[in-house]
Amino acid sequence: MIRKKRKRGAPPGPCRSHGPRPATAPAPPPSPEPTRPAWTGMGLRAAPSSAAPAAAEVEQRRRPGLCPPPLELLLLLLLSLELLHAGDCQQPAQCRIQKCTTDFVSLTSHLNSAIDGFDSEFCKALRAYAGCTQRTSKACRGNLVYHSAVLGISDLMSQRNCSKDGPTSSTNPEVTHDPCNYHSHAGAREHRRGDQNPPNYLFCGLFGDPHLRTFKDHFQTCKVEGAWPLIDNNYLSVQVTNVPVVPGSSATATNKITIIFKAHHECTDQKVYQAVTDDLPAAFVDGTTSGGDGDAKSLRIVERESGHYVEMHALYIGTTVFVRQVGRYLTLAIRMPEDLAMSYEESQDLQLCMNGCPVSERIDDGQGQVSAILGHSLPRTSLVQAWPGYTLETASTRCHEKMPVKDIYFQSCVFDLLTTGDANFTAAAHSALEDVEALHPRKERWHIFPSSGNGTPHGGSELSVSLGLTCLILIVFL
């Protein structure tokens, strides 16, 4: 087969064009290579030389029937244009990714992962961030910061299990904050003042014989038999009733807790919760389990363990309450914003969480140290078994199994076992420490360690602990 020789300058195959194919003209003599225009920077090309039009005309006569450029060349051209104009995406009038990021930071800077409602508010802010990036996607398609933000939003939504559909945070919380969400309007106040510090939270707990941890992180062992107010401010009242644990002993424990969530504007009516031994309900006294309107209840009860453990979440005042029954007695732990906890009148100054137990009701050394009572040594013969079933050694071993760290909670556990003989107090001390870790806003203050009279740590001296506990036990039974 004789293969025809293709003419030089002709396209490799038929070409679809918009008009009839002109006859092939003889190739003109080669012309000198035109001078290539120089780049002046910033994507602008210098004016072409006078030889450029002539060269273009010659090239047109040489290849009169060119096909449209292939797809790869078009994509390359588009990419070149995007790179040339990538700097334009940084202009606030077009690509607004920086504004989107700033709004997201503003919406989340006041949030605290340790408080209730964090995930909900964070997901709202993420959805608002995603919506903002979508609105500016066209102007930002060549912006690496934009694409990084989109990937980051996707990762965060997966980590927090956020749905793509749902409510979004307003970028103007100063105007549209939720009055029944303390974290929302507290953040709005901080935003108006230009202060990015989140609100401060306080913790109070009561457990065991009973042992009290105040809002000021003071630890006390008290008698307080009968009804006593733990908290009494303009938003919340908590009252506990304590009864003797052992006949002939001043040691008491809590068998009744009454909590009153006071009416608060449109957020909730007054709600009363009451628990007594063997009756730890998962509802308020009126039979309801929540307060406030709408799907996102501003006040709700969550039952964690039927008959033994309930949580109350008051979103409108940023407050969380844990109530447990361990053995025959009740424990309580609460976290509340400092500004609300301090909202009370002079007539409401008798609050154990705020000011501690009265001096006449304390059976410790005034600093919560059950290991330093009396401050002097007793003969070794006094180290006797305080209650049938436990010695100091066996009580310490039992408590150490639950609480490896020999802090004030460990000491309280040992004290309770020696004074009552009730092993349930070990579980009470352990759950009280768990509640501290769940609610206390500052991790470095979870553990409180006994200190000597001059304020220095004991260093874990077993002798000082044993002498102090023996002294305290003698006081309790006298």
Image (cartoon, rainbow, N blue to C red):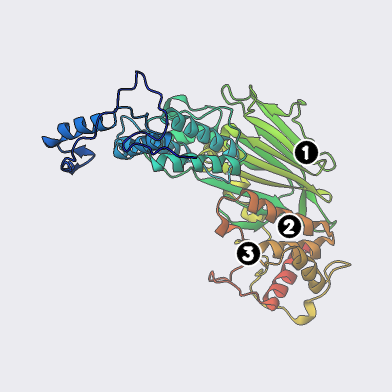
| N-terminal label among 1 and 2 | 1
Most foreground residue, 416 or 73: 73
* Residue ID at (22%, 41%): 42
Name the residue beneath numbered marker 2.
430
Q: Residue furthest front?
A: 1
Q: Amino acid at mark 2?
A: His
Q: CA distance from mark 2 to mark 3?
A: 23 Å
Residue type for callout 1: Ala
Question: Residue 136, located in which quarter of the rendered image?
Answer: top left
> Mark 2, mark 3: which one is toward the viewer?
2
- The residue tagged with tag 1: helix, strand or loop? strand
Residue 56: quadrant of the picture = top left
The residue labelled by disc 3 is 365
Residue 330 vs 184, above or below: the answer is below
Q: Residue furthest left?
A: 50
Residue 407, position as x, y percentages in the image:
65, 65
Figure check: 363 above or below 356: below
Amino acid at the residue labelled 3: Asp
